[in-house]
Amino acid sequence: MTDIPSQHLERAVRELSRLPGIGRKTAMRLALHLLRRDRKEIQAFADSIVGMADGVRYCHVCHNISDQDTCPICANPARDHTTVCVVETVEDVIAIEATNQYRGVYHVLGGVISPIDAVGPQDLEIQSLVERVAAEVPQEIILALSPTMEGDTTAYYIYRKLQPTPARITTIARGIAQNDQLHYADELTLGRSILDRHPFTI
């Protein structure tokens, strides 16, 4: 791409292109769009990003995002705290909540075990899950991980770590295609997968 005649625009394009799925051409289009907006709109946009970075926390119970130390789901007494759904990311929580088919609570791992990416069990919230299960003694633990090699490896590892627990360990039905990411599934398919869960087997 031709050199940009403004260093300020160049910097904006460079920063926007750091976002996932945003190439330099798309970043240029976004930057030029912002440049044409009213300054108040641009300031509101910038303030929202800074506010997000400064204000968003991670729930000390389940590691979901929140504005407080405890997320609204964990703090809600109407939720079924005897059922814990283990997911990879915050996006998965949002996707499952959108189905309106699940009333339990969550535990966000922060990813999956992936040796090729140098992500091991110690890099995820697996130990905190083990400690939480020991302390809360839930009746059911749902392993709602993506049906990928990494997801299956992580589910097996967690299953082995939780063997001493009396809780029923289940997994979601395989209505989701192999190698698909959970949060990309449509709401109907994901909702049915949650409802039709079955015992985890190896």
Image (cartoon, rainbow, N blue to C red):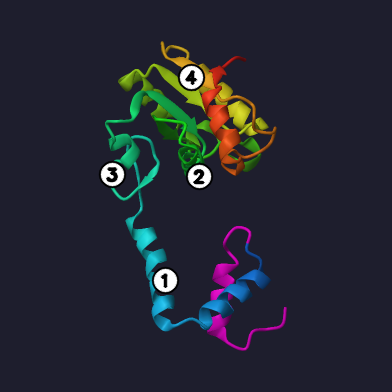
The one nearer the camera, 101 or 165, is: 101
Residue behind mark 4: 161
Alpha-carbon span between mark 4 and mark 1: 43 Å
Residue sitting at 32 percent across and 57 percent down?
55
Q: Are marks 3 and 1 in contact (CB under 8 Å)?
A: no
Alpha-carbon span between mark 2 and mark 3: 19 Å
Dot 2 or dot 3: first in sequence order is 3
Alpha-carbon span between mark 4 and mark 3: 27 Å
Dot 4 or dot 3: first in sequence order is 3
Dot 4 or dot 2: first in sequence order is 2
* Mark 3 element type: loop
Residue behind mark 2: 91
For this orientation, the residue located farthest to the bottom is 5
Name the spot of residue 159 as percent of width and height, x first: 52, 19
* Mark 1 element type: helix
The one nearer the camera, 59 or 142, is: 142
Residue 187 lies in quadrant: top right
Alpha-carbon span between mark 2 and mark 1: 23 Å
Residue sitting at 58 percent across and 87 percent down?
6
Q: Which residues are magenta?
A: 1-21
Q: Are marks 4 and 1 in contact (CB under 8 Å)?
A: no
* Amino acid type at mark 3: Asp
Report the side of 109 relative to 186 (left or right): left
Name the spot of residue 72 as percent of width and height, x first: 31, 41
Looking at the rendered structure, which numbered label has been put on residue 46?
1
Alpha-carbon span between mark 4 and mark 2: 25 Å
Within 10 angstroms of label 3, few (less than 14), some, or many (20 or more) residues? some
Count the marks.
4
Q: Are marks 2 and 1 in contact (CB under 8 Å)?
A: no
Dot 3 or dot 1: first in sequence order is 1
| Location of residue 23 with respect to 28 vertically, above or below | above
